[in-house]
């Protein structure tokens, strides 16, 4: 109230002051344009301008208010469409999580055209169609997703590749993933999917080339990656032989296998599974001499019981030299059961039967082992030492006696029932 009174007081003072000015000097204004002139006082001109401004302002508000109902109607329709889209999207996602694939596809597809983010609806609807085994509808929905949101190509292609892998469409999936890899070379999930595609296709060469990328992006756990790397190189060794033509000679096979072996990373060259397989393949192509040199070099660099036992299975270029080399290892590894087994076998190659028996017995003393027992039994049997063979078998059976459960036994010479 006080504020209104102050405003009215100011207006009265201003009006009185303006009225006094108008009485003292009404002013004069002359407007001329071509043959027309207009004469008036300054105060009349100011009044006309004020009234003109008020009229224009009124006309502007009138036009705006006439258009407003149409804009409000359009805004209401837009809000309604968005509410319906959100409602159906929510129902579709809930149905998708519950496994109601047909209902999810219907709700999500219907809401896509009205949704602010149609790509999400189309991707989820495509997944629902895929779960129903409807690959045609699934691919069609993925294409709609591309058309609605071209910038989401990576996400759409990843979904497509996953579905192709699940359908068993391995070649198309590989093509999709290779294209994706060029688009997003550092995308970890793409690399993982590519690994799965190579595995299912048994493309060991492609998988081997992918290993550095898997390591760099840490796309797998360390133990899983080591196992995969071992698997790749094992198959690469096999492939180096099987990929050659039937007419390939021994030298050609040896060169191919050696190249594959040399491509293996240094830490894996001592892996027992890998070395054993390489050794078997070298023996198959008649290259035991080269294997003996390789094993000798590996054992020299670092002692390994498995490699030492393997060394005794190989027939080198000179059996006596091979035996002397193994004897030299006894100085530093006198308590090695694997070395004693190898010395026994190499002694047999040189027809040193007595020394072979001693080495086998020493190996059994250090570590009872079925393989060593079989070697000793075979040698004693062929030497005709049946009593010694029987004593050895009795001694071994007595060692197993403690592992048997306590059961009642018949008295000597009792009859069986």
Image (cartoon, rainbow, N blue to C red):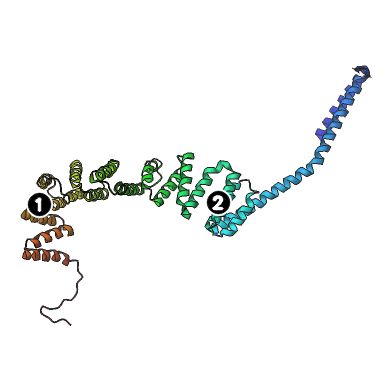
**Residue drawn where x is 59% and y is 43% of the image:** 149
Depth check, front residue: 251 or 281: 251
Q: Which percent across, then down, holds residue 320?
A: 9, 47
Q: Is residue 144 visible?
A: yes
**Residue drawn where x is 9% and y is 54% of the image:** 356
Q: Label 2: state its secondary structure.
A: helix
Q: Quadrant of residue 405?
A: bottom left
Q: Label 1: state its secondary structure.
A: helix
Q: Is residue 395 above or below residue 204?
A: below
Quarter of the rendering occupied by the C terminus: bottom left
* Circle number at residue 347: 1
Q: Is residue 11 left or right of residue 295?
A: right
Depth check, front residue: 70 or 240: 240
Depth check, front residue: 55 or 9: 55
Quarter of the rendering occupied by the N terminus: top right
Depth check, front residue: 253 or 324: 253
**Residue drawn where x is 38% and y is 46% of the image:** 207
Q: Is residue 399 above or below residue 185?
A: below
Q: Which percent across, then down, holds residue 250?
A: 23, 46
Q: Which percent across, then down, holds residue 27?
A: 91, 17
């Amino acid at each position: 109230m006080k504020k209104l009174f102050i405003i009215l007081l100011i207006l009265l003072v201003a009006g009185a002051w303006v009225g006094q000015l108008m009485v003292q000097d009404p002013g004069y204004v002359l407007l001329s344009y071509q043959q027309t002139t207009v004469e008036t006082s300054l105060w009349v001109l100011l009044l006309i301008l004020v009234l003109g401004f008020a009229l224009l302002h009124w006309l502007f508000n009138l036009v705006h208010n006439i258009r407003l109902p149409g804009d409000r109607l359009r805004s209401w329709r837009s809000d309604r469409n968005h509410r319906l889209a959100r409602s159906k999207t929510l129902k579709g996602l809930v149905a998708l999580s519950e496994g109601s694939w047909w209902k999810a596809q219907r709700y999500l597809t219907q809401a896509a055209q009205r949704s602010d983010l149609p790509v999400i609806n189309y991707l989820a609807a495509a997944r629902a169609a895929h779960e129903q085994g409807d690959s045609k509808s699934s691919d069609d929905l993925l294409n709609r997703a591309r058309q609605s949101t071209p910038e989401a190509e990576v996400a759409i292609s990843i979904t497509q590749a996953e579905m192709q892998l699940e359908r068993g469409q391995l070649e198309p999936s590989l093509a999709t993933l290779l294209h994706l890899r060029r688009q997003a070379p550092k995308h970890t999930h793409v690399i993982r999917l590519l690994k799965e595609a190579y595995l299912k296709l048994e493309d060991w060469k492609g998988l081997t080339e992918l290993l550095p990328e898997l390591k760099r992006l840490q796309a797998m756990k360390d133990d899983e990656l080591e196992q995969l790397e071992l698997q790749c190189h094992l198959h690469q060794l096999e492939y180096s032989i099987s990929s050659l033509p039937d007419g390939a000679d021994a030298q050609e096979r040896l060169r191919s296998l050696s190249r594959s072996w040399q491509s293996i990373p240094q830490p894996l060259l001592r892996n027992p599974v890998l070395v054993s397989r390489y050794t078997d393949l070298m023996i198959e192509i008649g290259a035991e001499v080269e294997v003996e040199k390789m094993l000798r070099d590996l054992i020299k660099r670092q002692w390994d019981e498995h490699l030492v036992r393997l060394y005794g299975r190989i027939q080198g270029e000179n059996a006596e030299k091979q035996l002397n080399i193994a004897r030299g290892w006894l100085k530093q590894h006198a308590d090695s059961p694997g070395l004693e087994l190898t010395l026994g076998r190499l002694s047999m190659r040189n027809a040193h039967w007595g020394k072979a028996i001693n080495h086998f017995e020493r190996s059994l003393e250090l570590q009872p082992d079925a393989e060593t027992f079989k070697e000793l039994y075979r040698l004693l049997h062929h030497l005709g030492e049946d009593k010694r063979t029987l004593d050895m078998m009795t001694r071994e059976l007595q060692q197993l006696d403690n592992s048997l459960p306590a059961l009642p036994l018949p008295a000597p010479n009792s009859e069986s029932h």
